[in-house]
Amino acid sequence: MNSRIKRTQRDYTLDFKLSVVEQVEKGELTYKQAQERYGVQGRSTVLVWLRKHGRQDWRDDASSTPMPTKPRPLTPEQQIKALQVQLHEANEKARLFEAMLNVLKQDYGVRVVKKPLGQVLAQKLVPGLSVAKACRYLGWSRQAYYQDRQRQGARVTRHEAVVRQVQEVRLRQPRLGTRKLHHLLRERWQAQGITLGRDALFGMLGRARLLVPPKRAYHKTTNSHHRFRRHPNLLKPGPLQVKIDRPEQVWVADITYLPTQQQCVYLSLVTDACSRKIVGWHVHDTLQTEGVRKALEMALRQRQSTLPLIHHSDRGIQYCAEPYQQLHRQHGIRCSMTDGYDCYQNALAERVNGILKGELLLHRPSDLRQARQMVEQSVAIYNGERPHLSLKYRTPDEVHRAFFRQDKPVALPSQQVST
């Protein structure tokens, strides 16, 4: 991270702060190492996060660890005997490794000289061993050794630069995938003279342990067994299927759980099916219709057109209830619902839930207020920074703004929501 840019506490998201606190408390990093790795500015910023969000006591208490006792010195006879044993073991070990190297060269054709020799000399694993002697022992010229070290140094420099830039992006999007990282950083790498393909980036992040493992979870929040009227599925494949070709034509809605340290709260989302933009959201502590209705009201306040609009959801009781349907009639919205409890018929909404919870909301908030703050920050990152493969690596905000530009509306290709 560029340390020349002065940052404040607002520049770090709450999810990032909780991630740093968790790593320090698990013992993976000290607070100073975390500060250097992630470029956190301020001498005591990480300590402030630990005192505010950590579960341990981080007050400056003096440690009461006892002083270690010194071992008793050996007699000269004991020292001689110990040195003889070490010499015998060292000679035996050297003969063992020489025999293994000969087998690898003669029977398997494996060349095990260049890389290990460079590491041994660079790390000074054999004190007093010069480059000339090491090359002479292994039958290798010094010129070849220095050329190989130069290539190795260039690769290490490139690797460090790429990993550092990936970590900068993942400060705000901790679980952003490798393909999207390659798209976001490709132009920057070209300007720096770095040539790196997608598969090479996968290998580099794998060696740096920065690949994102998948998360799978299933929790049911839909009650489709009720007395209210259901509506037909207008997005189901067939002759009457609606073809999506513009934003604010189809909105998809869903409810997902969001665990906190005190209780389980719920997140209601309304997403535009064309631009993939989250146009409405609300975090509530019950599954009452009022909390779901507030998400739709937020979306309606941000609506920019008066063209026909379809609202698609599952057959949950919240969406079929009279207060929610009354809001549809008030704004002239057609209602579309899945056929029974089939999550694949509302796949886009389920996918947005997974992105928010699997990539951005990685830490459990303490209460409802903190959950709303974390969701607000995550939705802003999702809409404005995260590229989508289905949008040709554009962000939802870019696609949404492109269609509603006042000078010239941009025609978008027709899409179909997967069912």
Image: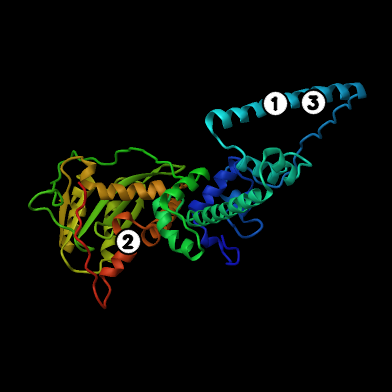
Q: Which dot marks residue 87?
A: 3
Q: Dividing the image into 4 quarters, which one contains the N terminus? A: bottom right
Q: Residue at x 60, y 67 (%)?
A: 4
Q: Closest to the observer: 84 or 165?
A: 84
Upstream in the sequence, badge 2 or badge 1?
1
Taking the spot 57% from the left edge, 42% from the top edge, the residue there is: 55
Q: Which residue is mark 1?
A: 95
Residue 206, numbered circle = none
Q: Look at label 3 and name its amino acid.
A: Leu
Helix, strand or loop under label 1: helix
Query: Label 3 vs label 1: CA separation?
Result: 12 Å
Left or right for 126, reference 232: right
The numbered mark, 3 or 1, whose residue comes first in the sequence reads 3
In the image, farthest residue toward the left: 239
- Residue 251 at what x, y percent from top left? 23, 57
The picture quadrant where one finds residue 265 is top left
Q: Nearer the viewer, mark 3 or mark 1?
A: 1
Q: Secondary structure at mark 3?
A: helix
In x, y percent, where is residue 252? 24, 53
Q: Is residue 300 left or right of residue 22?
A: left
- Kindly report the distance in space between the C-alpha atoms of the residues bearing marks 2 and 3: 68 Å
Disc 1 residue type?
Arg
* Residue that numbered label 2 is attached to: 396
Residue 318: x and y in percent read 23, 47
Whether the residues at callouts 2 and 3 have beta carbons within 8 Å, the answer is: no
Mark 3 closeness class: few <14, some 14–19, many ≥20 residues within 10 Å: few
Say which of 408 and 27 sits in front.
Answer: 408
Q: Earlier in the sequence, mark 2 or mark 3?
A: 3
Percent position (x, y) of residue 56? 61, 42
Regarding residue 56, the answer to whether it shows in the image is no
Where 226 sits versus 9, above or below?
Answer: above
